[in-house]
Image (cartoon, helix red, strand yellow):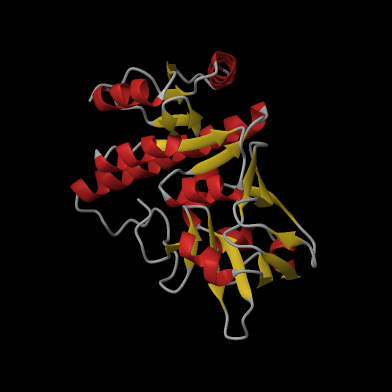
């Protein structure tokens, strides 16, 4: 497949396509557009787009059809799902089906550019991994997968149920690698409620970008890891153990866990 643009925007609203195109141009991305599912499938069948920004609700179908089409064709684009009909189900389904991010409309310039930045880094890591495999250099570790008994929401966040019934929540190493270096972490407080698929923590990188992490599960925060607040680098050094973020009492773990992916599954 040829590559004619960095990003494909799939949206039936002209004003949205124009806005996204102008925003992405700020970071020097080239952009192609499609107004519906049919047109988008035609474009992705002929051309590889490293990044796809896709609306969920469209006149002739939905964005989940795009995710299914990419999966069936083994096309490894980084997909960012957007929608004006923001629901928990839409966010969770998007990441479960392979999107790397979900941002509700209306989104800010910074929110979109941060998401696109991570999508671009994700592609770079994926390409580097393929190169190493071709060179038989599998010993170089680009990121660490979630441990076997963990469950993750897309490539972003993870949860682990402890013996006492509480659940630890944290961030996947691959998500951190797409941010690069974390300068500051903004967390919620104890007794606050988390909701699956809704932002629960913000990472501020050294370049000033803010990256929001979606919670893998719903529940009440009973403990915040104070160590990561005092030492942000801890979460990068040990994201799955000492670098956990919250301990929560889950509200509906049996139902919500069905929409998560086993930690042992390959991320790339």
What percent of the width, then of the height, locates residue 96?
A: 44, 52
- Does 208 appear above or below 257? above
Residue depicted at 19% across the width and 53% down the height = 136
Comparing 222 with 250, the one in front is: 250
Residue depicted at 59% across the width and 52% down the height = 197
What percent of the width, then of the height, locates residue 187?
A: 74, 56
In the picture as drawn, the residue positioned furthest to the front comes out as 60
- Does 107 appear above or below 267? above
What percent of the width, then of the height, locates residue 191?
A: 80, 67
The answer to whether residue 243 shows anywhere in this view is no
Comparing 63 with 142, the one in front is: 63
Residue depicted at 45% across the width and 65% down the height = 146
**Residue 123: quarter of image:** top left
Looking at the rendering, in which quadrant would you find the N terminus?
A: top left
What percent of the width, then of the height, locates residue 160?
A: 54, 72
- Report whether 266 appears left or right of 222: left
- Does 239 appear above or below 247? above
Comparing 109 with 39, the one in front is: 39
The answer to whether residue 255 shows anywhere in this view is yes
- Report whether 31 appears left or right of 171: left
Residue depicted at 62% across the width and 40% down the height = 86
- Report whether 37 appears left or right of 1: right
Numbered circles on residues, count: 0
In the picture as drawn, the residue positioned furthest to the bottom comes out as 164
Comparing 127 with 246, the one in front is: 246
């Amino acid at each position: 497949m040829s590559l004619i643009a960095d990003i494909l925007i799939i949206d039936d609203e002209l004003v949205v396509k124009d806005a996204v195109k102008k925003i992405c141009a700020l970071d020097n991305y080239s952009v192609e557009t499609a107004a519906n599912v049919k047109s988008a499938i035609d474009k992705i069948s002929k051309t590889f787009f490293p990044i796809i920004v896709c609306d969920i609700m469209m006149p002739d179908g939905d964005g989940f059809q795009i995710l299914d089409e990419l999966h069936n064709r083994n096309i490894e684009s980084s997909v960012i799902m957007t929608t004006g009909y923001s629901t928990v189900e839409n966010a969770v389904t998007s990441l479960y089906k392979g999107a790397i991010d979900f941002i509700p409309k209306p989104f800010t310039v910074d929110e979109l550019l941060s998401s696109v930045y991570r999508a671009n880094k994700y592609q770079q890591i994926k390409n580097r991994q393929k190169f190493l495999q071709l060179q038989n250099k599998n010993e170089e570790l680009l990121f660490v997968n979630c441990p076997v008994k963990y469950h993750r929401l897309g490539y972003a966040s993870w949860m682990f149920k402890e013996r006492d019934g509480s659940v630890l929540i944290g961030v996947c190493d691959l998500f951190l690698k797409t941010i690069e270096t974390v300068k500051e972490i903004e967390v919620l407080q104890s007794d606050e409620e988390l909701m699956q698929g809704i932002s629960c923590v913000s990472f501020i990188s050294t370049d000033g970008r803010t990256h929001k992490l979606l919670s893998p599960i719903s529940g009440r925060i009973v403990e915040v890891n104070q160590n990561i607040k005092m030492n942000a680098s801890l979460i990068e050094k040990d994201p799955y153990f000492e670098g956990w973020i919250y301990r929560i009492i889950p509200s509906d773990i049996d139902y919500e866990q069905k929409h998560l992916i086993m930690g042992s599954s390959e991320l790339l």
